[in-house]
Image (cartoon, coloured by chain):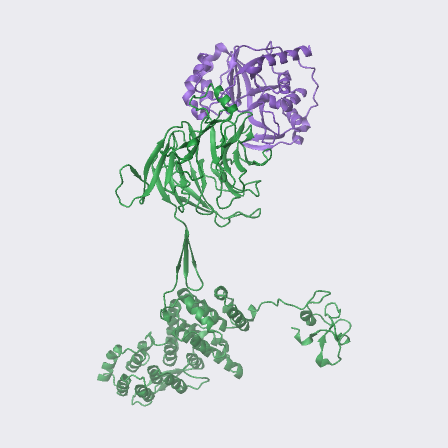
Chain colours: A purple, B green
């Protein structure tokens, strides 16, 4: 398998709900008019608490600082796993499950904190820029690593970076975070870029004004499955702790359950198939019990 | 597509139909417009063709790509890829009773909806349809559907579950289980099946080109590249593939897939379509955004580039089918080099790319040119008179008749050339006289004029300045009192020899020359020469003889009578009448005779500038009657004239000097006769002219020409001839007898290496010095091989050493 290090340098920030008015214009521009800005990586997640935004430095410049905005100090790099057709896995499970064992767990062992961002198309793993040598060293056995430079993929050799490599300090067994699952049901969709203008008003409506969503506009899988959310963390998780994704993804991977995983400023969220929600909650509770 | 940009496709089996697709599919029928009027409802595509709209299909919204069913189907079955990833089979026919009826309306639905980027029917198994989709995190982006597959119970269950999709699907027509799924967690932007095997699929994925082998789907061959758009296989070379990225086209050789074998020059705007011409090998058409030209790349010369560093030559051309921007184009599947283009506002135009014309002369006068698949030949017509024949034909015939190879009787070469060209005749006589003179000089070893002979009369005359003695002479046989001044010198008589008037030495007797002219029946010339030698009686005698001979002209008698009436008196009636009436004489020599008789002493322009009189006669005349200054001026002027005209008679004046090469150059420019040029220049053997690069060029060209005619023997003869006259052109020995032990040449080194130690006689079988043979290698002293029977050494004769 190939691991691609994308060229985006991403900042992670949180906007307080009450400060949204200040940012509506830049957000709409970044969201709906990607050709108007040089921003190439943009993610907006709404939670009951806040809006979490992950965007590259070009996009970050467009957001004026204010009291409503909280920014994580470090810069994050985006990793993407490409199967490259060589995977011989028979597993049809999708999402973080697929990479839990190969990426998430080794990184957790090496004390690397990650943020996850699952999309319809792929899963992005965000790591701190300073952790990159460790990441490369850790994953070099499992993956062919390519770095994206000006649109071209350049292979990365372990030797180039091992000089600055620090021996992993084995972290104490990570804290086990409580999980909870609200009753909302989720649908995961994609929008073809050229149909964006047609649904822009609806999208704006949904994002900023209401909680209705029309059912006949967006595309989803033919099986029409629906998803439930599992929220991880009782209190804000912070950015330094490692192994949070791993402790959720690994049990799910063992049980071969598909999942989407989205990290936000405060909490992490996993989306799991609706049919198995009870089993999953049970599975994750068990993990809590076993460690305590 | 999707409303904004129409695409266009020719029907693969109905050569007169094509479809334009944007938000709907419109089928057109193309027909030739015989009259200038348009039928109602038809659109003009070109001067000869119009298009008629047959039907419109707007059943399938959100079209992203269309592919025409490759098997013959009267109903125009099409596969349409939609924005949600579904592939729908639809048709443009009206007849719903066709055998493909059950296929129409069938839908193929991917597990996760996303845009369908490309479709490709398998050319060998027309049930297979490959679809390339956008990325989904864990789903496959290349799906191969079997259009004949029936819906399965599982998929029926799945369709019931579709809650968010449009509810227009009919149960039983939806297929959700693809035959093959490839390219997990990747996006597919373009697809094409490889004609090498039914199960090989080439796909332009997100960041690489991949070849999927359906016999083993876990294996794939891939190369990382950005050029992943529009992969397409050359229909003539199945290993050659084109793909593009923004403005750049990459050409790949699948046998050497690591990197493109070449990339075409980048264009400023992004490309939108790249297509190989199906009717012509190696022709690739490319179209960029917002452009009204189609760029063509002709890769004709290197169908399959071999080797690492050889960049094949490509001829780039642009064609402009219409004035507007072009949205898309499509090559006609069978009609040669024809395409139809469509503009964004859906005007169409039928266009044929004109083929480049290549033209070639054959070495035997025929001309050929090729245009497309037509080959035209143009040959010389019938039996034109030999003078009008092409120089190549002439040279060929002359080469066959051994022209130029007679080195003894040099003048005979003009007979070998066909005895038709007076210039050639003059040339070879000049060369003959030159050669004759030098041979005489060699025998007598007198004087030092030998070196001058080949330098021509111009140089001879220059060297004679001041040595001339004048001689007052009375015209014998006349009662004229006034004397005519004649000039004499050694050089002048040499010039006269070269002109052929006199034989050799200081003997000024022209009688032998007159006799030879009489024999040839050249009466007028003979009479003129006799007169110029101041022998009117002889001249009259010649004319009488001419008039009485078999084919003679009776008018010659009249001329003789007029001649006999010659009077010296300045104001006589004879003189007056002759000087005016002579201009009406047809024969230039007769005309010159009267001009001579009526002219004042010392001014002979009427003779000297009578252009129809042979140059040699005029020069000889000038040498007799002009003083040094006049002579020099005249020769100088005449030389320049002849040089400019490329008249070979001028070689008499220029000789085989640089001037002569200049003259020959303008002759070759005029006629292309490198044969005569080569042979002529070779005659001037020891001189520097052979080193002139023009001369070498003519010689090389003549040799090439002989090669091209496959006259191998003639070429060998020419080379031998050449090496005789120009020893420097002799090729180095290529075959040597070499020693088995030291590898050195036996024959060559025997004289070069001084004897060391023991003499040859020690190895000699017979002690007799007369039969001396080399029996040991002169290089290493090892004995040469012996005869297997008699054990006598097989040596080489000592005398054979160079």
Residue A82 at what x, y percent from top left?
Answer: 58, 28
Residue situated in front as seen by the camera: B166 or B134: B166
Residue situated in front as seen by the camera: B511 or B523: B523
Q: Quadrant of residue A106?
A: top right
Look at the image and tell me whether residue A221 can be seen: no
Does A287 sit left or right of B451 as displayed?
right
Residue situated in front as seen by the camera: B15 or B335: B15
Residue at position x 75%, y 69% in the image: B782
Does B623 sit left or right of B684 as displayed?
left
Q: Quadrant of residue B637?
A: bottom left
Residue B120 at what x, y percent from top left?
Answer: 48, 35
Placement of B159 over or under B119, stated as above or below = above
Residue B604 at what x, y percent from top left?
Answer: 32, 78
Residue B388 at what x, y percent from top left?
Answer: 36, 68
Does B198 sit left or right of B64 as displayed?
right
Residue at the left extreme of this rendering = B573
Does B231 sit left or right of B44 as displayed?
right
The quadrant of the image that shows the N terminus of chain B is top left
Placement of B381 over or under B266, stated as above or below = below
């Amino acid at each position: 398998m190939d691991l691609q290090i994308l060229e985006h340098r991403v900042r992670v920030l949180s906007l307080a709900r009450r400060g949204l008015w200040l940012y509506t214009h830049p957000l709409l521009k970044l969201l709906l008019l990607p050709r108007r800005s040089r921003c190439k990586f943009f993610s907006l997640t709404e939670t009951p608490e806040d809006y979490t935004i992950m965007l590259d430095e070009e996009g970050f410049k467009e957001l004026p600082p204010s009291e409503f905005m909280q920014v994580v100090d470090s810069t994050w790099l985006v990793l993407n796993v490409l199967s490259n057709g060589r995977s011989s896995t028979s597993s049809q499970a999708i999402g973080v499950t697929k990479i839990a064992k190969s990426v998430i767990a080794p990184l957790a062992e090496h004390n690397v904190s990650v943020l996850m961002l699952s999309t319809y198309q792929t899963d992005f793993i965000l790591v701190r820029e300073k952790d990159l040598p460790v990441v490369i060293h850790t994953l070099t056995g499992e993956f062919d690593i390519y770095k994206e430079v000006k649109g071209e993929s350049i292979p990365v050799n372990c030797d180039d970076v091992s000089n600055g490599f620090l021996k992993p300090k084995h972290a104490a067994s990570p804290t086990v975070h409580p999980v909870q699952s609200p009753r909302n049901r989720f649908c995961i969709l994609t929008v073809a870029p050229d149909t964006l203008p047609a649904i822009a008003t609806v999208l704006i409506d949904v994002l900023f004004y209401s909680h209705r969503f029309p059912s006949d506009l967006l595309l989803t899988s033919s099986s029409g499955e629906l998803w439930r959310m599992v929220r991880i963390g009782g209190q804000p998780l912070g950015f330094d702790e490692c192994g949070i994704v791993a402790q959720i993804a690994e049990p799910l991977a063992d049980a071969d359950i598909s999942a989407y995983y989205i990290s936000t400023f405060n909490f992490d969220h996993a989306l799991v198939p609706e049919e198995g929600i009870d089993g999953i909650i049970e599975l994750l509770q068990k993990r809590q019990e076993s460690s305590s | 597509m999707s409303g904004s940009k129409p695409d266009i496709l020719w029907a693969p089996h109905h050569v007169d139909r094509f479809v334009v697709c944007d938000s709907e599919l419109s089928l057109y029928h193309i027909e030739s417009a015989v009259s200038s009027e348009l039928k109602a409802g038809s659109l003009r595509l070109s001067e000869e063709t119009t298009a008629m709209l047959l039907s419109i299909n707007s059943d399938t919204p959100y079209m992203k790509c269309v592919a025409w069913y490759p098997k013959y189907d009267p109903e125009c079955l099409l596969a349409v890829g939609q924005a949600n990833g579904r592939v729908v089979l639809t048709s443009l026919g009206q007849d719903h009773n066709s055998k493909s009826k059950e296929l129409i309306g069938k839908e193929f639905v991917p597990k996760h909806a996303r845009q369908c980027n490309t479709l490709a029917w398998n050319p060998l198994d027309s049930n297979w349809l490959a679809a390339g989709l956008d990325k989904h995190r864990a789903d496959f982006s290349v799906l191969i559907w079997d259009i004949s597959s029936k819906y399965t119970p599982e998929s029926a269950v799945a369709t019931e579950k579709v809650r968010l999709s449009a509810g227009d699907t009919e149960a039983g027509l939806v297929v959700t289980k693809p035959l093959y799924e490839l390219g997990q967690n990747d996006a597919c932007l373009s697809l094409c099946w490889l004609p090498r095997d039914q199960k090989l699929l080439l796909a332009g994925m997100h960041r690489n080109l991949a070849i999927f082998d359906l016999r083993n789907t876990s294996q794939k061959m891939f190369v990382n590249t950005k050029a992943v758009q529009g992969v397409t296989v050359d229909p003539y070379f199945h290993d050659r593939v084109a793909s593009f990225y923004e403005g750049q086209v990459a050409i790949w050789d699948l046998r050497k897939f690591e990197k493109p074998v070449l990339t075409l020059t980048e264009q400023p705007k992004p490309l939108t379509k790249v297509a190989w011409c199906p009717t012509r090998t190696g022709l690739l058409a490319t179209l960029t955004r917002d452009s009204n030209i189609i760029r063509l790349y002709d890769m004709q010369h290197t169908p399959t580039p071999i080797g690492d560093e050889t960049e094949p030559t490509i001829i780039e051309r642009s064609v402009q089918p219409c004035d507007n921007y072009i949205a898309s184009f499509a090559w006609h599947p069978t009609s040669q080099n024809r395409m139809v283009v469509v503009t964004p506002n859906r005007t169409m135009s039928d266009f044929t790319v004109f083929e480049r014309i290549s033209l070639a002369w054959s070495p035997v006068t025929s001309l050929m040119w090729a245009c497309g698949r037509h080959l035209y030949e143009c040959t010389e017509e019938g039996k034109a008179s030999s003078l009008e024949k092409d120089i190549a034909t002439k040279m060929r015939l002359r080469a066959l008749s051994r022209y130029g190879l007679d080195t003894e009787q040099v003048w005979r070469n003009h007979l070998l050339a066909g005895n038709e060209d007076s210039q050639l005749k003059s040339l070879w006589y000049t060369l003959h006289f030159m050669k004759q003179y030098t041979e005489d000089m060699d025998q007598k070893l007198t004087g030092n004029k030998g070196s001058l002979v080949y330098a021509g009369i111009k140089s001879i005359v220059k060297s004679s300045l001041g040595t001339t003695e004048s001689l007052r002479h009375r015209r014998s046989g006349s009662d004229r009192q006034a004397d005519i001044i004649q000039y004499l010198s050694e050089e002048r008589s040499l010039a006269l020899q070269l002109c052929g008037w006199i034989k050799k030495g200081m003997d000024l007797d022209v009688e032998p020359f007159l006799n030879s002219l009489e024999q040839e029946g050249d009466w007028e010339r003979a009479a003129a020469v006799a007169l110029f030698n101041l022998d009117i009686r002889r001249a009259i005698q010649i004319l009488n003889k001419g008039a009485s001979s078999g084919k003679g002209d009776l008018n010659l008698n009249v001329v003789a009578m007029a001649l006999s009436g010659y009077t010296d008196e300045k104001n006589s009636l004879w003189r007056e009448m002759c000087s005016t009436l002579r201009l009406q004489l047809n024969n230039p020599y007769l005309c010159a005779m009267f001009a001579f008789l009526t002219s004042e002493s010392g001014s002979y322009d009427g003779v000297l500038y009578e252009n129809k009189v042979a140059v040699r006669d005029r020069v000889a005349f000038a040498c007799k009657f002009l003083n040094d200054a006049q002579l020099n001026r005249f020769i100088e002027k005449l030389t320049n004239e002849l040089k400019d005209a490329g008249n070979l008679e001028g070689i008499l004046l220029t000789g085989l000097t640089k001037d002569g090469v200049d003259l020959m150059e303008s002759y070759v420019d005029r006629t292309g006769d490198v044969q005569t040029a080569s042979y002529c220049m070779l005659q001037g053997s020891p001189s520097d002219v052979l080193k002139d690069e023009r001369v070498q060029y003519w010689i090389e060209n003549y040799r090439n020409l002989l090669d091209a005619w496959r006259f191998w023997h003639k070429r060998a003869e020419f080379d031998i001839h050449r090496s005789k006259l120009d020893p420097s052109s002799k090729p180095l020995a290529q075959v040597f007898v070499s020693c088995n032990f030291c590898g050195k040449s036996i024959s060559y080194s025997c004289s070069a290496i001084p004897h060391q130690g023991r003499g040859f006689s020690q190895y000699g079988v017979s002690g007799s010095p007369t039969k001396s043979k080399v029996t040991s290698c002169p290089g290493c002293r090892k004995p040469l091989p012996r005869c297997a029977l008699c054990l006598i050494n097989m040596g080489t004769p000592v005398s054979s050493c160079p």
